[in-house]
Image (spheres, grey):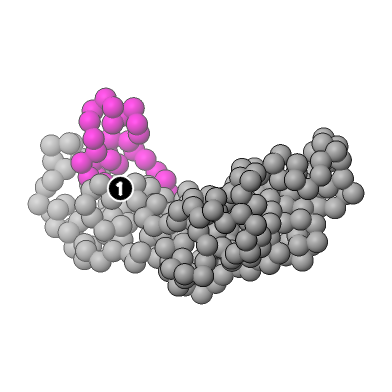
Amino acid sequence: MIEERKKNGDYTSLKDFLVRTRAGFEDTVHLIKCGAMDCFGMARPDLLRQLDIYVKYRRILDTLQESLFADEEIELENKVIDGLDYSIEERCLAEMKAFDYMVTRHPLQFYGGWTNDPTVTTASEIPKMHGKNVKMVGWFMTAKRIRTKDGKAMKFLSLEDLTDTFEAVLFPETYAKYAEKTLSFGPYLVEGKVDALSGNNLIVNKLEVIGGELDMELLQGATYSESNYNGENEKIFEEETQITLNLDKEKLIRAYAG
C-alpha cells in the first residue's frame, strides 16, 4: 500500500484505493474503522457501506480506470451515503481495538468528572508534592511485577493522565489486596504518598478502577493477563528475584520506577 502510494500518488477515494492495491475486505474494514481513510472526507459508516457494494458488485472494480465513474456506478454508490458518522465513543472504541490506544481522544477525556476534580492531583504536579498524601487518576501504559527479597510479589504500574506520566508503586501488602484490579487498562483512581525524589512516583495504599462514563465492556480483548499483554511479558524471572535480594525499599523504587 505504501509503495503504491509512493509510486503513483495519494489515494483519492476508497474505490481508487481498492483498484490500486486489491486489498482484502477484512483489512479494508479495519482501515476504515480505525480512521485511516478519514482523508476521503466521508463518514466511516458510509465508507463501510460502499465497501460492501464494491465487494458485491466486483465489476465496479474490474472495469477499466477510465470508466470507473460511469453514471450507473456513481448512482449505486451514492444510494448508501447518508453522512451519519459514528459517535465519538464508537470512534474511540474502534481505534482502541485496532491500536490498543485511542487517536481521536485520550481515554481520560471521557472522565471529565475525575480529571476536572480539584481534589485530584495531576502527574505534572508531583514534583512539588513530595511526602504528601494525594489521590490521582491514571490510564494504564505498562506494568512490571517483581518479588522482594523475602519472596513477596509487588507491582509497578506506569500510568498517565492528561498532563504527564507517573509510576504507581504497589508494595506487597497493597498488591495482595488489589492485584486483581490491576489487570485492566483502568482508568485507575489511586491514593497514596508521593515520592518525588526518585521520579514521578506514588506509593499506593488504595486503588480503584473507575467505571461508568465509557463502556469499557465493548473493548473486547483490551484487558491483559498477568503473564502476557500488549506483546510484553510480565513473568517474574529468577534473575529479577536475585537482583531484588539486595535492594531496600528506596532502591527498589529507583531501580524500577520510570
Q: According to the image, label 1 marks what residue?
A: 37
Q: Kindly tell me whether residue 226 is visible in this rendering.
A: no
* Residue 17 image position (x, y, % from top left): 28, 40
Name the residue nearer the viewer: 12 or 120.
Answer: 120
Q: Is residue 8 above or below residue 212?
A: above
* Residue 3 image position (x, y, % from top left): 34, 27
Decide: few, some or many residues near mark 1? Use Cα within 10 Å; few <14, some 14-19, many ≥20: many
Instruction: Single out the residue that lies furthest toward the bottom.
Output: 212
User: What element does badge 1 sit on?
Assistant: loop
User: What kind of secondary structure does the magenta stretch mostly adopt?
Assistant: helix
| Quadrant assignment, res 199 | top right
Q: Kindly tell me whether residue 208 is visible in this rendering.
A: yes
Name the residue nearer the viewer: 205 or 82.
Answer: 205
User: Could you tell me which residue is drawn at 39 percent across and 57 percent down?
Assistant: 105
User: Could you tell me which residue is drawn at 20 percent across and 41 percent down?
Assistant: 12
Report the magenta residues as a range. Answer: 1-27
Rendered-image quadrant of the N terminus: top left
Instruction: Please name the amino acid that badge 1 sits on.
Output: Met
